[in-house]
Amino acid sequence: MKTSLDCIPCFLSQSLEASRMVSDDREVHEKVLKKVMNYLQNISFDFPPPFVSRKVHEIIRREVGSKDPYKTAKEKSNIVTRGYYEKLNKIVDESQDPFICSLKVAIAGNAIDFGTMNRIGIDEAIERVLNSELDSSTCERLRKDIERAESILYLADNAGETYFDKVLLAQLEGKEITYVVKANPIINDATVEDALLAGIDEHAEILAGDEGQESSAPAIILDYSSERFRKKFWDADVVIAKGQGNYEALSEVNRKIYFLLMAKCRLVAEDLGCEVGCPVIKLKGEGNDTLHSKR
Amino acid sequence: MKTSLDCIPCFLSQSLEASRMVSDDREVHEKVLKKVMNYLQNISFDFPPPFVSRKVHEIIRREVGSKDPYKTAKEKSNIVTRGYYEKLNKIVDESQDPFICSLKVAIAGNAIDFGTMNRIGIDEAIERVLNSELDSSTCERLRKDIERAESILYLADNAGETYFDKVLLAQLEGKEITYVVKANPIINDATVEDALLAGIDEHAEILAGDEGQESSAPAIILDYSSERFRKKFWDADVVIAKGQGNYEALSEVNRKIYFLLMAKCRLVAEDLGCEVGCPVIKLKGEGNDTLHSKR
């Protein structure tokens, strides 16, 4: 997905929010907004929003003098969501179809997102997603692909959401799973530290998909990803990608990817053909079915 | 009210919306956004938002090559709201307290606003406002002030809202009323043409408060108002001002003003001490009670 003109006001709202997270100085906030507006006047709209966001947040971090403006917000998310973990695991275990139920849990966790201005509460998201129907044919295709798969690449999204992902990962026992996070703090995206905190290493190898980069984007962008990541990306039997950022950055890449997300922005929702606030499982790049071609 | 940093994303959303109203050319929209961002980098935040908005819309009009980007939207509002007029008049006539009911109608009409990004539907606004309670002591003060008044200055807000205002004006029979509109098209604010279309001249003299100015702000700003307006403003026994723009521009002016509006923006709502979406009657500048000092 290309960056839209509608992303401009959103980048600026986000810049203001991030600045306020680390500074009470209105002059600092004003300086951030002006620097970001200066940058946005010269961007290309040919790349997905995470490309622009990466630079916008570099400006914010530099101007507010913080390596991680969302640190406190992420810590809070990690603490709050940890409290849901046992309960969600129990719901999945007692459900008629634990796989589908754990998919729903993982999607509901994507409500924890500071990268968009439409916010959904965690409780509301869980209630809404567990009581909704995901596209059953896509769910069944994913179930079959996983059954036949040896390796699964799981692109994570946000800190805290990690605990929701863990509920799904527990259902994928026996597979060689790689859980991909960001190398550096970017918005509230999960880093290696956040993944370890949630105990993701009980189920998967944790990999910073953009290791070696000085700053991260709020998505895995192939151009900024490591060679190690790219090898896994093209070789994995199944790729699951969480969140809007990964959808924006990877939905037009020529390989089969299952996207799991809450649609939180009008533009993403339109691209997906759903309403804002909807839980989504979306299969893209079906033509290039690496699983079939490899076997 | 001073312009807030939070107004920046809102000015840009509005610029995009206005550009799209008159042009399908994405390059034109991009040019508008970039020009507006360039302007916003150098503004002072010491003045109320309508000061900035006046310049922002000058840029939009110049770049899209239209004197009135909201022309079609205003025409539509005028047609739609005309359809409510008889019904609302009847509701007021049959109500227990026609004065209070007509105040509510006038406030509900303020839902018709393209100057804010939080939109309320007309039917929803009417239903919500008629079923809510306005601050009764302020309503009674206004009733008494009107009873004793000879002259009333009524600062209008938007096209279409004019029909709702007319319902209130009909309750002020026998007073010398001046209905103040904008001299030039600005967002969907009412001009002389819109006021005449609604038949406001059956109840009031219509005056463009900023006549002589080459462009209007979405509020009456004293610095840009005509001498004729200012004389009426300071001399009138009662001043009623509709909408957020007039509240932003005049709430700190040293004279008694009754503001009637729907709070549509978080910052205005906070300043008023209410929730977004609430109908409001607010008395400001009580210390300078010209009515008492004149009599």
Image: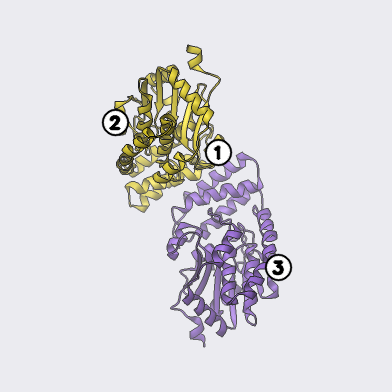
Chain colours: A yellow, B purple
Q: Which residue is mark 3?
A: B196
The Cα atoms of the two marked residues, 1 and 3, are separated by 44 Å
x and y, in percent, of residue A175 in the image: 37, 20
Mark 2 highlights which residue?
A199
Q: In terms of secondary structure, where does tag 2 sit?
A: loop
Q: Are marks 2 and 1 on the same chain?
A: yes
Residue at image location 28% in from the left, 34% down from the top = A197
Q: Give the residue type at disc 2.
A: Gly
Kindly identify which chain the residue marked by label 1 belongs to.
A
Looking at the rendered structure, the secondary structure element under dot 1 is loop
Q: Badge 2: few (under 14), some or many (20 or more) residues near its Cα, within 10 Å?
A: some
Q: Residue at x 35, y 28 (%)?
A: A170
In the picture, measured across the screen, residue B268 lies left or right of residue A204, that is: right
Question: Foreground mark, 2 or 3?
Answer: 2
Residue B217 shows in the view? no
Chain under numbered label 3: B
Rendered image quadrant of residue A79: top left
Residues at circles 1 and 3 in contact by the CB criterion of under 8 Å? no
Q: Which mark is residue A175?
A: none
Residue shown at 64% from the left, 59% from the top: B185
Measure how far apart labels 2 and 3 are at the Cα level: 70 Å
Q: Name the kind of residue labelled 3 in the image.
A: Leu
Amino acid at dot 1? Cys
Q: Position of residue A158 (x, y in %)?
A: 38, 36
Say which element carries label 3: helix
Q: Is residue B67 above or below residue A186?
A: below
Q: Please state if B209 lies on the left or on the right of A123 as rendered.
A: right
Which residue was labeled with disc 1? A274
Q: Which residue is nearer to you in this view: A148 or A163?
A: A148
> Quick one: B286 or B136, which is closer to the camera?
B136
